[in-house]
Image: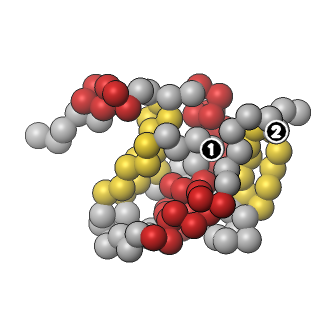
Amino acid sequence: MDETLDTLSTGGLRILQPRKGYRYSMDALILPFFVEPKPGASIVELGAGSGVVSLLLARRCPACRITAVEIQERLHRIHEKNLALNDLGDRIKLVRGDIRRMEELMPPAT
């Protein structure tokens, strides 16, 4: 298996992540606590990786609309698994693509 399954004491989330390569760091664990989103807020996480930040935000703000953008196919797939593992698939919209093409990934609402 080229992934590990870890449990975050913060939020009680289970997180799959690559055994080698990108793995979440302390930054991902504390970043969600630097924002105070209001219920109904729209949040976009750019470079979402395995999804730690967006998952923690979804737990902190159940009424927020969260979109997570990741370009790497492998991390995108792991993020999808993490949504399912933590039963948050209906709370986070996961988008695979390049943030340099945001207009195509997330067209403005009309």
Q: Is residue 50 left or right of residue 92?
A: right
What is the x, y in percent for residue 19? 82, 38
**Dot 2 corresponds to which residue?**
19
Q: SS for tag 1? A: loop
Q: Residues within 10 Å of mark 2 (few under 14, many from 20)?
A: few
Q: Report the disc number at residue 24.
A: none
Q: Is residue 55 visible?
A: no
What is the x, y in percent for residue 91? 46, 55
**Dot 1 corresponds to which residue?**
50
What is the x, y in percent for residue 108? 18, 38
Q: CA distance from mark 1 to mark 2?
A: 12 Å
Which corner quadrant of the image does residue 72 belong to?
top right
Pointer 1 and pointer 2: residues touching (CB < 8 Å)?
no
Name the residue type under label 2.
Answer: Arg
Which corner quadrant of the image does residue 50 belong to?
top right
In terms of sequence position, does the residue under pointer 1 or pointer 2 come before the other?
2
What is the x, y in percent for residue 66? 40, 53
Q: Is residue 36 left or right of residue 92?
A: left
Give the residue drawn at x 30%, y 32%: 102
Give the residue drawn at x 72%, y 64%: 8
| Residue sitting nearer the eye, 40 or 3 | 3
What's the coloring here? Answer: secondary structure
Name the residue type under label 1.
Answer: Ser
Residue found at the far left of this picture: 110
